[in-house]
Amino acid sequence: MTMRTAFCLAALTASALAQTSDPWFSTFSIIAWNPDTKELGVAVESRAFGAGAAVPYAIPGIGAVATQAAANRLYGAKAITLLQKGLTPAEVVKRITDEDTGRDSRQVAVIDIQGRSAVFTGKTTLTHVFAGHVTGKNFSVQGNTLAGEEVVKAVAATYESTKGSMAERFMAALVAGQSKGGDRRGMQSAGILVVRPIPPGSDSTVERVVDIRVDDAVDPFKELRRLLNLTMAGTHAQQSAQLAKESKFADALAEQKQAVEMNPRNEGTHYALAQRYTQNHEFVNAIVELREALTIQKNLREQASADPVFAPLRDFVEFKRLIQTP
């Protein structure tokens, strides 16, 4: 066998191993449970492609899982099934890792709806500079291949001290972790997943309150922040619509203003803001916002013309001009 042939065979063998082995997610993540909102979630940042798709797993009303390092993506479904059977997170983590011959290269965290959490960090993972975790009330932070312990400490402290929705707290916590060095190799991907049970009697079919990720970017946080704003704009718009149904028009207006601020390029947010202004008898502002909506999407003219909310505007010359077909 020639040296060149041996080299080629070695390269092919290495390539085959690379294709069959689990990708390594040099990662820090946080899993959490909010007993007030019934939300479960996972947030992650990594110097690896697609961490936001691979690491988080959560099912409303049951639990959340983060699988990383040499991520075993079967852990998520297995862990949830075991939680459903009544096992504690500690028992779940022991079961799924005991059954996994590759456990020494894994890191996995599990949390349930009692706020109990458990983390496993394999022996091989511990050799990758810093790997470890910090556990708090209703959350756990874990990571590997990190700049140091201060990364997980910063994520934990920021999550605890930040106000707002779980997703907003996750975003702040990830940024804090990166400020302490994050993944020692740099940044590439990030993701946030938040789930919540559908309330009884709700018309909604959405359990994933926030489900966003950036697979590959020099600064994934910049794009993740933009995507989170778009998601939260939808949440504010939904709250605005509900408040309007309850005739709480001033509060509905405030919510819809936030929706427009977070998603200014969407015609629907401007259209709804025009409705809220009309309901608050701010007719000039209503026409301004309706004009903006129609500038973005002219096909809304017919809808606006027939919309009963805009009845008080129909005698305004400017309103008539807006809904005229060109």
Image (cartoon, grey):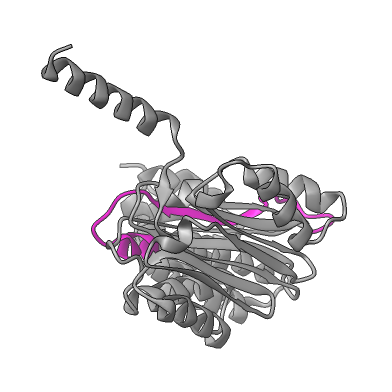
Is 130 rendered above or below residue 323? Answer: below
- Residue at the (78%, 45%) spot, across then down: 81
Residue at the far top: name it: 1
In this rendering, the answer to whether 180 lies above or below 267 is below
Identify whether 283 is placed above or below 57: below
Q: Residue at 52% x, 76% y: name it.
A: 169
Percent across and percent down for residue 295 are 31, 53
Q: Is residue 195 visible?
A: yes
Identify the residue shown where x is 69% and y is 69%. 33
User: Quarter holding the N terminus?
Assistant: top left
Residue 277 in the image: state x and y as whole percent: 51, 73
* Residue 245 can be seen in this image: no
Pick whichever, 317 or 289, lies toward us. 289
The reply, left or right, for residue 7 in relation to residue 190 is left
Q: Nearer the viewer, residue 141 or 257?
A: 141
Highlighted range, magenta:
198-226
Magenta-drawn stretch contains 325: no
* x, y percent for residue 6: 20, 19
- In what quadrant of the picture does the C terminus appear? top left
Nearer the observer, 288 or 183? 183
Q: Nearer the viewer, residue 167 or 244?
A: 167
Magenta stretch containing residue 218, yes or no?
yes
At x 50%, y 64%, the residue is: 29
